[in-house]
Every structure is written in C-alpha cells, then in structure tokens.
Amino acid sequence: MHETIENSFPSPLVLPAPIPLVEHPAAVYLASLSPGSRTSMRYALDAIARVLTDNSCDAMTLNWAALRYKHTAAVRAAFSQKYAPAYVNKLLSALRRVLKEALRLELIDAVDFSRAVDIQNVKASKQLRGRILTQEEIAALMQVCFDDPTPAGYRDAALIAILRGCGVRRSELVNLNLSDLDLNTGAVFVRHGKGGKDRTVYLPDSGLAVVSDWLSLRGNEDEPLLCQINKSGRIVRQRLTSQAVLFILLKRGQLIGVANFSAHDFRRTFISELLDNGEDISTVQRLAGHANTNQTARYDRRGEETKRRAVQKLSIPVRQKNL
C-alpha cells in the first residue's frame, strides 16, 4: 500500500469521465513503448496515480493534465523516501513522458508543463550495480551444459552462448526467432529492442557452433529460437519467458557453485570486454543498442587494472644513470 502525498488534493486530479485512448496522455505514452516495457511502466504510472489520489485513481483515471509542480515535486519527495534512486528516477521519467504527451495533445499549456517537469532526478549512489563474469566462470557454465546430454543441455548452452556472445537483454533473447539468425554470417537480428529499436548483432563463430548443435535437435521450423522443454525432455515449440531464463541460469550456476550473477551480467561482461579489447565506444554502443555512449560507459566494469594498463602506454623520459 502506497502512502498518499496529501489526502486533500482536489477532485480535478480525477478524470470526470473516460476519454478516448488516442487523447489520453498515459495511453499514448504506453502505446509508444515496446511490449516488454509497457507492463512495467504502466505499473509505475499506476503507483503515481495512487499516491496522488489516496488510492482512488490508476493511470487511466488520473487527470494528468491537471498536475502542477506541487504535485510532481511531492511525488518525487514521497517515493524518494521509500525506494532506491534508480526506481524513483524511472517513475519520474515516466511522469515527464506522460506530461509531454499531454502537452502535445494540447491538454496542458507550455508554462504549466515546463514547471511541472522541472524536477531533478534523485542522485544515485556511485556504487556500480552488477559485475563481470570471469572467463573461468563462463567456461564452467558452458561445460555444465555440455555435460548434460539432454535437449535442455543443448538449449541452455545455446542460451548462454547468445547472452555471452551478443550481449542481448533477456527480453530480446526470448523474442528471437530462427529466422532472425543468419547461420552463414552469425548475424542476429534483434527486433523491438529497448525503445522499440531494431538492431543487428553478431554471434562469434564459436557461439554459432554451439547454437548449431542446439538446432540439430530443435529442427528447422521457424518461430522461437529457444524453446521450452517439458518434464519428459521433449522440445515444445513455445517461447521461453524472461523469468525462465533466470531460472535456467540459477540452476546452472548452482550446479557449479557460481552464484551472485544475473543475465544482465553477461551484458556487462560483453560491453566491458569489447572496450578492453580496444573497440571504439561508438561500435560497442551500436552493438549494445544504447541511445548514446554515456549509457554504454555506465556498463563498463573493467575496474582499476584497465586504468593502470592504460597509463603504461604513456612515454615519459627517464634520467640516464651513469655507468
């Protein structure tokens, strides 16, 4: 149950009657998102609506155009007391985007809009989240799959190979179809990534061999590249869920004693290693599907040793000692 900001906010915050979805700022904003983001952002908007109206509104019944600076500032204050900065900033981003749609729909004037969105993000801790996986950990995860002769072993090896070799997000991984993979070049076409953007990434030859082994069992029919496997070990042509990917990695990690890692850590490892290998950050940005290089830099987990090695390349004359 969310705390309310004030129990005395006036009724203009509640829509007096339903409005068409094409004229509803929250509906227009949610429609612009990828299916994977839509659910989480709808939840965020519902949370904002509840805290503003003593739980009497959700995202679709709140009158977003009636929000003013006092409301948005109060939302920031209320949530920053209870949640981590990253989550609060996610809420504030959604709030700004909905108000932007209200401005475009001519439901709020420019002055009220500019004041309402003039709220600062909550400063996050400088402690970086996640980690990179070592080569030994990745090798052990792959080997435990190779040692499993069942279809699940072949599928899970392919799953890890794609995470490790392409740096895709979980939602992107489970949405891949066989037709998205070019077995000749290793190109993997990622459809509707974050922000609804498509991109092409490339699976290394070693990863392509692992995926090809899985396909020899799976068959050549299109649709989900990574399928479900039932309790009897039979391949079922149904798409994995993002949650299933977590369970698969947890299971394989427990078998070899590797804990405290996530699917996203493969992505951090992918980005960090490419940067460490000297690839320019713009290329890595495009492979990762980031909007800008600043996002890519936040995934860099190479640590102090990389900085130490970098400065060793600088040449400084030294004093010649007399023999």
Image: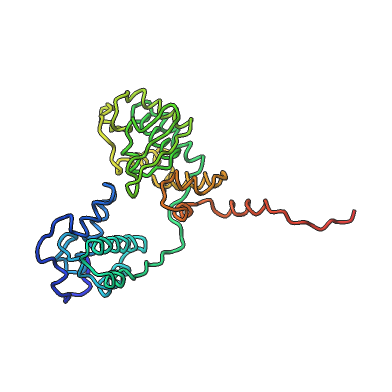
**Which residue is outermost to the bottom?**
8
Left or right of 15 on screen, residue 172: right
The x and y percentages for residue 289 are 41, 46
Q: Is residue 122 above or below residue 323?
A: below
Left or right of 70 on screen, residue 89: right
The x and y percentages for residue 306 are 58, 51
The x and y percentages for residue 15 are 13, 65
User: How was this image coloured?
Assistant: rainbow
Q: What residue lies at 30% left-to-right and 40% top-to-bottom?
A: 244
Q: Is residue 45 above or below residue 195?
A: below
Left or right of 318 on screen, residue 197: left
Residue closer to the observer: 72 or 1: 72
Residue closer to the observer: 277 or 261: 277
Q: What residue lies at 23% left-to-right and 51% top-to-bottom?
A: 31
The x and y percentages for residue 61 are 15, 62
Q: What residue lies at 30% left-to-right and 63% top-to-bottom?
A: 96
